[in-house]
Image (cartoon, rainbow, N blue to C red):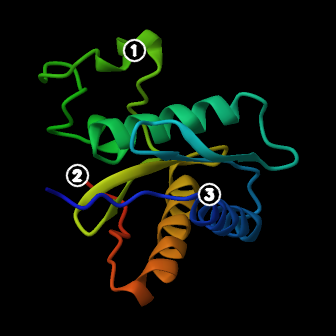
Amino acid sequence: MKTILKLERAEARAMVAAAIAKAEELGVPESVCVVDEGGYPIALERMDGARITGPQIAWNKAWTAAGHKRSTHLFTKPPHGPALPGNEAYGIQLSFEGRFAAFVGGFPVVVDGQVIGGVGLSGGNGEQDIACGLAALAALQSIVSSAGHTVVVEADIKK
């Protein structure tokens, strides 16, 4: 038997709040989505002034990261990104009715070595989306560290 960790609403909301605080600091209107291990939203928020397409894109990124257990930008990171032309997953972004996000802004939520969800961001450039995603993961680490859990807080996550 295996003990399964699950993200809860309070944790997801804290992650969204941290990402939005970072976005405000950077001066970029973001949409942020935190999903469970199945890719379903727990918390989703669009900042004032953010694009109306942002929530769906953020969800797609979080869904992809949780489901494929890696940061979404790793799919197209040269030279061996699997979704690059000539590599084994070229065209994967056309999968799942185009829902598969193979670009920057999605991160798996890895706690104690288990992927328990994902966080996706849309609205900034790649660097800004990464900064906001790292803020979300760091917020979760802050919450769960007192219980002895460890969260992977880095941009390039591949489980």
The residue furthest right is: 48
Helix, strand or loop status at disc 2: loop
Label 1 and label 2: CA atoms lie apart by 21 Å
Position of 146 relative to 62 (above/below): below
Q: Position of residue 125 (x, y in %)?
A: 58, 48
Label 2, residues with CA under 10 Å away: few <14, some 14-19, many ≥20: some
| Residue position for label 3 | 9
**Residue drawn at the location 46% of the way across and 46% of the way down:** 36
Of labels 1 and 2, earlier in sequence is 1
| Residue position for label 1 | 96
Helix, strand or loop status at disc 3: helix
- Tell me if 70 is positioned left or right of 143 in this view: left
The residue furthest bottom is: 146
**Residue drawn at the location 76% of the way across and 51% of the way down:** 29
- Tell me if 1 is positioned left or right of 23 in this view: left
- 19 or 2: nearer the viewer: 2
Helix, strand or loop status at disc 1: helix
Position of 23 relative to 95 (above/below): below
Placement of the N terminus among the 4 image quadrants: bottom left
**Residue drawn at the location 33% of the way across and 85% of the way down:** 148
Label 1, residues with CA under 10 Å away: few <14, some 14-19, many ≥20: few
Task: Give residue 23's mark.
Answer: none
Of labels 3 and 1, earlier in sequence is 3
Q: Position of residue 99 (x, y in %)?
A: 47, 20
- 24 or 142: nearer the viewer: 142
Q: Position of residue 23 (x, y in %)?
A: 70, 62
- Tell me if 90 is positioned left or right of 52 in this view: left
| Residue position for label 2 | 158
Quarter holding residue 38 = top left
Label 3 and label 2: CA atoms lie apart by 25 Å
Label 3 and label 1: CA atoms lie apart by 26 Å
